[in-house]
Image (cartoon, rainbow, N blue to C red):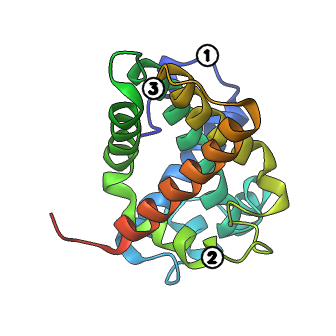
Amino acid sequence: MLKNASLGPKLKKSELTRQHLREIALEAFRTKGYESCSMRELAGIAGVTAPAFYYYYTSKEEIIAEFYQESLRLHLESSAELINEKSGLSGNLKSVIEARFREFKDHREILIVLKKMGFDRDHELSPFHESHQEIRKASVDLFENIMEKSQLKWPAKTKRDLAQVLWLFHLLILFYWISDHSP
């Protein structure tokens, strides 16, 4: 998902190293499980010393948070292309939510970590944590954009409130989907 560094703007060596370490850690989380991996073990898998790994990431939570932020950035970019006036509210909601499922298809093991901590607003990985205010705003903005493209008339206050409800609904569906392995 995040491996195509050469497609974006040219990154500094330190940014490439950070990205490389994140990908190695995410793969270890996928295969061994988040709880089973220590930072020291991640450093060993990456072929760097523990202090070198800690230079880039101070915790496993920081790796997961960065993964989620990057995936959200990419999702917001791709969702802009999915939303259109002809699909209406339900069609656009379905397109955006299904796109998120496809993007996360190979990352359920990583997302389980987010689900476990997601409802604890004091945990740094929770979407409700104060440090994720910008993420929440961008996510709610996406749902407000869907509503605007639906061609229905919404009072401004109602539109923002409903966009927040739709974002929360989306989170609940996502949290359920993370654990549900049915077709």
Q: Mark 2 to mark 1: distance in Å?
A: 33 Å
Give whichever of discs 3 and 2 has the lower sequence position.
3
| Residue at 46% over, 67% down | 175
Checking the image for residue 78, the label placed there is 3
Label 2 amino acid? Met
The part of the image, by quadrant, that contains residue 182 is bottom left
Label 1 amino acid? Pro
Q: Is residue 67 visible to the viewer in this orientation of the structure?
A: no
Side (left or right) of 89 relative to 20: left
Q: Mark 3 to mark 1: distance in Å?
A: 17 Å
Q: Which quadrant is home to the N terminus?
A: top left
Report which residue position mark 1 lands on: 9
| On screen, residue 177 above or below 70 | below
Q: Is residue 124 visible to the viewer in this orientation of the structure?
A: yes
Whether pointer 3 and pointer 1 mark residues with C-beta atoms closer than 8 Å, the reply is: no
| Residue at 53% over, 78% down | 37
Q: Mark 3 to mark 2: distance in Å?
A: 27 Å
Label 3 amino acid? Ser
Q: Nearer the viewer, residue 44 or 118?
A: 118
Checking the image for residue 117, the label placed there is 2
x, y percent for residue 32: 39, 76
The part of the image, by quadrant, that contains residue 114 is bottom right
Q: Residues within 10 Å of mark 3 (few under 14, many from 20)?
A: some
Q: Which quadrant is home to the C terminus?
A: bottom left
Side (left or right) of 183 relative to 7: left
Q: Residues within 10 Å of mark 1 (few under 14, many from 20)?
A: few
Give whichever of discs 3 and 1 has the lower sequence position.
1
| Residue at 53% over, 83% down | 35
x, y percent for residue 23: 50, 50
